[in-house]
Image: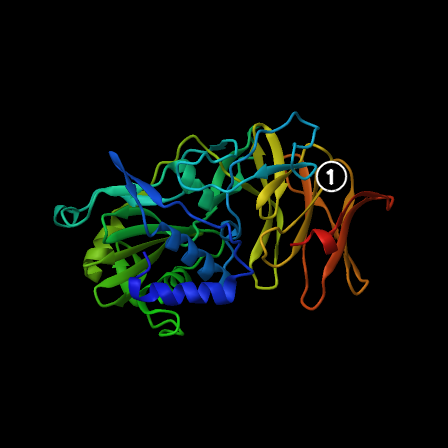
Amino acid sequence: MIDEDTDTEFEALLTATLAEMIPAAHRAAEHRSVIGRPRVRRDSRRFALVGSALVAAAGIAAFVLLQTHHVATPTPPAGQPPTGGTPATISVPSIDDEHSPVPFDGVAVAPGTIGWFHLGHTPAPLTARIGAEQRWSDAYTSIFFTCADWDRAKPMLTCTRLEGGNYISHTRYGSNLEIGTQLGDGVDAAKVLWAMAQGSLWGYDRQQSPPTPTVVRIGTIDGVSDRNGDTAYLAWQRSPGVVVWLKATGFTDAEMAQLAAAVEPVQLPATLPLITSIGTPANDLHGVRRWIHLASVHGVRCVGITLYNQCTRADQGPVLVHTLDGSDPAVGAVMDTGRAATLVVTLRNGDRRRVPLVVADLGLQTALYTQPSGVTMVAAEIVDASGATISTIDLATSSP
């Protein structure tokens, strides 16, 4: 949780610096499930806000920071636009809490896929000092992750690797121990530690640069720790692309190392309502890695960059999508494979940028373009090999 003495300044920082980067509707649930009974989680909204702010400010890519899963309206028959929505889109109002349904269809998850973590067996003296395990449902927790890779040998989409984490804890024990993870290519324990500890332990205006962390031995690997008084973070690289962290109050470094040694992956269910990242990513103006995302709602595949308020149907021909959450502008093209095509983006200065669509698997080909500094995108189109236009979008009027 965010310490009370830094909460006010964090809210001010968030409002002042990230109002245009994080959509106003980006909310996390305020409930978790305690084993055996429900419990209100009052600080979870702050968890999601600090995660969003840290990733945006640091330029660390985690798509879920810039989008929210949503509850879908009933899907019309294939080939017909939804009533009351933009043609070729599915309207997806935001989730209110963990008890709201996650709208996306289940994606198969391969056994052994790494997601979030919890404690396994801990030494008895430490067990007596921690509370009952509290976790959101697996379906709700999955909204903070995406499917980043899948088994291409299987006819059905079967996810083998997750990315994300949202810089929030996913498991909590009482009021003095939390566990979180960040998954993704190039994720680094020291960077995750600083992203978590700066605002929580000291405050953004009090600690401008990362201190030299304390090295803490965890079994055969080294973790890094920051501490302020009785509260500390400990982060470690469990494997390439997997950083796990603890936040604890009232434990020594040696005791935190014992707790870290007991942390193990939660066994994920056979299916989760995941969004899948497809195609080739592109970095926006702030260095945040953007993707085109694929989901399914009631059996209808749909795509988007942020999936904010709507998901554009992928079953009605070539699709053009753009950012809808107030973050740096980007536009993407998606269409079935088998036909060569190019995304052509027109800038206000008259330049036209061309990005060929490339096969992204799952029967789709994609292209993604992010707006460069100093100019504005005004239109985009998909053209075929003969130069004929097959889909267009007016970005000058449709951009938020």
The quarter holding residue 114 reads: top left
The residue that appears at 58% across and 48% down in the rendered structure is 306
Which residue is most to the top?
77
Total labels: the figure holds 1
The location of residue 246, given as percent across then percent down, is: 30, 54
Mark 1 residue type: Pro
Residue 385 lies left or right of residue 283; in this view the side is right
Query: Percent position (x, y) of residue 259?
Result: 23, 51
Among the 4 quarters of the image, the one containing residue 372: bottom right
Q: Residues within 10 Å of mark 1 (few under 14, many from 20)?
A: many
Relative side of 99 to 149, left or right: left
Relative to 267, residue 2 above or below: below
- The residue lying at 68 percent from left, 51 percent from top is 331
Q: As drawn, is 267 to the left or to the right of 390?
A: left
Secondary structure category for the residue under label 1: loop
For this rendering, which residue is in front, 166 or 30?
30
Q: Identify the residue under disc 1.
A: 318
